[in-house]
Image (tube, rainbow, N blue to C red):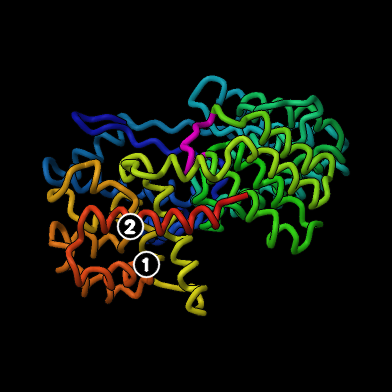
Amino acid sequence: MKSGTDYPILLQTNHAFSRDFFHYIKQGKSCEPSEAKTLADREILRAIRDCQNFVEKWKARRSLIDLLALLDNRLTFVVHELEDERTAYTTFEVLNSRGLEVSRVDRLKSGLMAKAFEKDSKASAELIAGLHKIWAEIYRCIGLRQGMDTEALRFAATLRAKDSTSRPLGEKEALETLLAEATEPTTIRACANWMLDVTKACDRVKSDRRLDAVTRIGQARLLAVALALRNDLGEERDRRLFPLWERTTFRIYGMYGKDARTGVGDFVRSARRTWKDGLDANAIAQELLSIGEEFPIEGAIAALRGRKLSEEWREELRYFFYRYEEYLAEQRGQTFANEQWQRIWEASAAQSIEHILPQSKGSEDLVQRLGNLLLLPPELNARLGNRDPREKAAAYRDTGLLIAQEVAAELDRPWTAKSIANREERLLAWAAREWGA
């Protein structure tokens, strides 16, 4: 519906498992969209909120009787009653081909369901019930993580593809690859279970702040997901292989600043060998070391020395200082757990970057160097503003952050260009040990 400057409200979802809509229709009650547990729930709750806001704006200009008349005369519902569930998936595909694009994960579900309905009734009923359960688990796993469904689909197909590939498959190609191998009840069920396994592996990487923060480069994350799928590697995976993946990946894409064009084939081939060929821990470690050979730590340190960082290196800077905070806690024999870091992770990286020497009191080449940067909870960072470094010392100490306290201990004397250079060298010396091969 469109009236004046008010635009239509569009709701598109085909996997809502909550009772939010039912409760709203029956009881007129709904919770905030921020309380949703999945993307589908959030879309329902946002649609409810949008409709409520529309009515409030309408009441400010015209009467509700006018709105009722408009709805009565111009609002039309098209209802399709389907006696057979299998028809729903055929209808879904037809409507999708003529309307808005829906996610390829939803199309994979529909495609597998349609294939399941083609089988004999007894086998079909059991298979369909199983697919419903698997997909409910997939959607719960995806939760509110925008884009994870796409990544899981692409990674699932890339790792499973029969033909060799040196790049992550695109969405369309991934969908076609997975559907092509799902021909019988066993392969249909296997495809759905594989999609669930990969989604869980993506969630494993995404929910680990350290792993998730390392990079957004697809081929590198594909290798991390391949590692997450290898539960048979035991403690070797978490103790040795993930840290080695971290060091190699951050060195290439963080410290050297390489983009997604670098290392595509190396990472993809290694990910496929890790999963399809079942490489043992030693072989995987050797693959990671081989990928990193072209990017030695000495060059990475040189790339950071004297470089302007905060504008182009925000996410990487947060990860860098998070790791440094871990190091300081370990040096003091403390358990690394700090609620201030929770606030830093929840905000955008840009809101947390603190310039010890304020930007208004020094040149860009000086104030944006690693030695002059720090991470603070966003509200404190905003409050400190352009204060002189010495005036910030007490606030730094009160954060409970070891990295801030370390800086505060140096602010009893003027914070100069030499102070910045000295701190930068100390941080780089630590980084050389931390991210060396």
The image's mark for residue 281 is none
Q: Position of residue 106 (x, y in %)?
A: 61, 37
Q: Earlier in the sequence, mark 2 or mark 1?
A: 1
Q: Position of residue 116 (x, y in %)?
A: 79, 36
The residue positioned 88% from the left and 36% from the top of the image is: 120
Quadrant where the N terminus is found in the figure: top left
Residue 295 lies left or right of residue 340; in this view the side is right
Q: Quadrant of residue 29?
A: bottom left
As drawn, 365 above or below 432 = above
Residue 244 lies left or right of residue 351; in this view the side is right
**Front position in the image: 290 or 172:** 290
Per the image, label 2 sits on a secondary structure element best described as: helix
- Outermost residue on the top side: it is 98
Q: Which residue is mark 2?
A: 422
Per the image, label 1 sits on a secondary structure element best described as: helix
Q: Can the viewer see residue 30?
A: no
Of circles 2 and 1, which is in front? 2
Estimate the spatial distance between the alpha carbons at disc 2 and disc 1, rounded to whole Å.
15 Å
The amino acid type of the residue labelled 1 equals Ile
Q: Residues within 10 Å of mark 1 (few under 14, many from 20)?
A: many
The amino acid type of the residue labelled 2 equals Asn
As drawn, 190 above or below 353 = above
The image's mark for residue 403 is 1
**Front position in the image: 361 or 233:** 361
**Front position in the image: 67 or 201:** 201
The residue positioned 75% from the left and 37% from the top of the image is: 272
* Magenta range: 253-260
